[in-house]
Image (cartoon, rainbow, N blue to C red):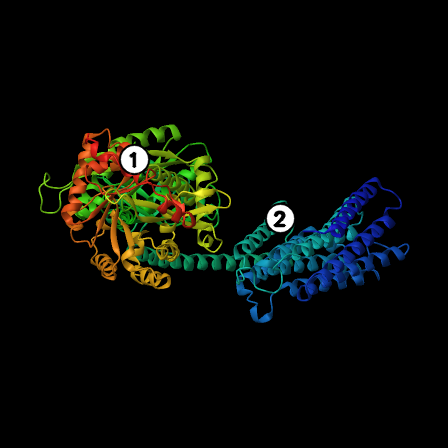
Amino acid sequence: MPDAATRAVLVLLALLGAGTTAVQLAGFPAAGRLLPAALALGSGAAAAALARRAALLPRPDRRPWRALSAAGALLALGQVLALARPGRDLSSGGIEELPTLLAVPVAIATAVLLLPPRAERRLGTRVLLDGLVVTVAVALLADVLLADLVAAVHRPAEGLIATGYPLVGAVLCGIGLVTLAAVPEARRRAAGWLLCSFVSMAVVALAGAAGRNAQDPAAEWGVVTALAWFAMLGTGLCAAAAADRPGTGDAPGADGRRRALPLRGGVLAHGAATSALVVLTGGVVAGRPLGAVEAAAATALLLLASVRTLSWVLDAARLTRRLERTEGWFRALVHSGDAVTVVLDAAGRITSATGPVQAQLGRSEEDLRGRLLVGLLHDEDRDLVVRVAAALRDGAPDGLPATGRLRTDDGTWRDVEVSGAARTGGRRTGDGLVLHLRDVTERRASHRELERLAYTDSLTGLPNRARFMAALDAALARAGRGPRACVLLVDLDGFKAVNDVAGHDAGDRLLCDVADTLRAEARGTDLVARLGGDEFALVVDGGPDEALALAERLVVRLDRTSRHAAPGESETAGPVLRVSASVGLTEVLPGADASATVREADLALRTVKAQGKNGVRASGEALVEESARRSRLARDLPGAIARGQLRVVYQPVAGAAEGRILGVEALVRWDHPEFGPVPPEEFIGLAEDDGLIVPLQRWVLATATAEHARLVAGGRDLKLGVNISVRHLQARCLVEDVVRALDASGLPAHLLMVEVTESVLMDDDERLLAELRALSALGCVVSLDDFGKGYSSLAYLARLPVQVLKMDRGFVSGIDTDPRGAALVGTVVDLGRTLGMDVVAEGVETRAQLEVLTALGCRFLQGWLIGRPVPAAALPGVVDGFDPGTLRGAETVAVP
């Protein structure tokens, strides 16, 4: 790209050419002095620009253009000398001719310096032939044009001008052509401009010779000479500008190879030879006599052109043999592989198909030829060719391999893979394509089967968690464009009982039934997945209203009470168990991520579970607040003991027959500095979920036994009940914790009652049974808390070392008005009496409940009627001040 200085000189040359032409054609008397002045100015400016340009190039690239700059300076010097010699005769030579003649070998040096190093220089006979043909042709043209002038030569100087200049021009043209053919690819553009400069120099020589040797020189010869001179300078500047590009050094081109141009050189050579012979023949036909020199030159030119033509023939024969050999190799390669090579024209029509066509594509080669490939593809794969073309247009085949379905001649479909592609003519948009096709039907079938196994739940056949997350990601991507979607998390209530009681086979059948129900209720556009265990999920294609309606239908459909037979039993022999579903709902929002969306739905699901199960809850601000509260409590609970936020209160248990307080139950309370009193059912669940229940109950044991020991030391015979989580039993450290607390407090073991919940009956683990037996062996009383609240296995109850049954408060509520409830309480009392267990009724809050319970024979009572939970400091007053009258009068009450 020419810089500003080069562009300025080019503009100057154009202006000088226009000015000299006008001056000469107008016949100004001063034209004889203005012309050499303009030529000197233009040559000097060009020489300076070339020198500046050479200085900007890397050192190895400077030499050719410094030589060309020197040639320009010599031309300028010659014109300055011509301007300084007054009264000169243009028809004869002078001192000014010497610098001009010296500029010729310097210009030739420019061409030589452009050539690669001698070790890498391979000109070849064809390149030399082309240069020789051009030289002879230009010399012959010059001789024809200047024959009359040469015949009129009388002095040696005139002969030098008439014959020397044209010969110099001919030699320059030949050398320029050889240079163009022999330089590396990176210098080809610069060599092309240099050839144009040499041709212009030849025109200068011919026109100058014609103008100087004519008897009556016309102004037109001077115009041609001046314009050719400025063109010579301008093309020389363009050659130097073309050299100022990356990669124009002596390296053999961008691809590491030198590529000659025998075709272009041959065309130029034959063009020059033809022109010379046509001009010579035209002169003979017009009656011009043919001289001996011209005849010899024409004969030599014909011989050279014939030799060059023969070399073309030999080259064509050699290339044909090479092409046939290469085509044979190509066909052998194509037919030896398992891919089919299909050639498409610019319209996408199949022009050729080679290779195992019938075996791979299910069609014959003749059937494919002339058809549009798009017409054979499945409707969903019609963009296959477009995708391949786009991948090639982008510069890298990132879109390959591409796969589509192609219809065979029997109407079936085959999965066909485009494993490779290329354009038939480079990167032009109108080119066709070469595609390598391969039948991958079996591989694709195996891939789809593996994909199905990877994304499918093996039990229910539903999509699994991975497929659900992929569908959720797709829904999140669509949410930003407008379509709405929601997520439903479905968790079964009571499923563990089915597995534990009826067996895992019954549980598996239940899961399959639930999966069928979800499929039936969901729409075709919804995705139903099983996440694991008894948890399912749906991606609902619609807004919250549609998703909520679907969730409510699912809750109704999945609320069922049925028999679940164990393996080997009939369908009517299994236990009757109730199973329901809790559903959490959240909307898929733009900008969210999949994990956050699932957490929102899971938070809504846990809210349903906490509120009694068998329902639907959608995520929202209330859930966010609840989640924040739960997170804060979970974060503060580990340090609550150290900060003194936990305390133990005691609720008395009275004996109806004894008429006094017989024991107390230790209850833990948490006074949070921000939320105030936290319900035990809230933070006890947190402690179990976060693995904090064991250290919490270890602190309760130590605190309660120590405070109770002081109460007993005051002469009060009271038992202490402490609630123990099943998780504490499962940790296998309960016995050690109890022993440690008893030893530290000095409380006798028979005064400690360890209360475990009824859920211990659901875990038929011999190690838990051994743990309870060890506590009983210590002398501790084992109590079964909340009896009747869940599933109670009476057979397993008989195996437990339990001395006390504590009836759930649900039995007591409404006992004074519900005869069936009263009968059930009586049954539990009788069961405890039969098994040798004391029965404690919890939740006694009214006088009527007290009277019914005592009438049924329940001896031990606990509830707000007996006494509310109080701190340890207030407990002696409660025990000592208890009014026995609270327990009187029950004998006269009839059971409802």
Asked if one can make out residue 613 in the rendered structure from this viewpoint, the answer is yes
Camera-nearest residue between 376 and 149: 376
Q: Which residue is identified by label 1? A: 614
Q: Based on the displayed image, in which of its 4 quarters is residue 767 positioned?
A: bottom left
Residue extending furthest toward the bottom: 119
Q: Position of residue 811 (x, y in %)?
A: 24, 37
Query: Which residue type carries mark 1?
Result: Asn
Residue 114 location (% of width, % of height): 64, 63
For the residue pair 425 and 103, the one nearer the viewer reads as: 425
- Residue 575 percent across, percent down from the top left: 14, 41
* Front in this rendered view, residue 296 or 458: 458
Which quadrant is home to the C terminus?
top left
Kind of element beneath mark 2: helix
Q: Residue at x 36, y 28 (%)?
A: 546
Dot 2 crowding, Cα within 10 Å, few <14, some 14–19, many 20+: some
Left or right, residue 98 beside residue 871: right
Q: Mark 2 highlights which residue?
A: 279
Instruction: Tell me the kind of residue under disc 2.
Output: Val
Mark in the foreground, 1 or 2:
1
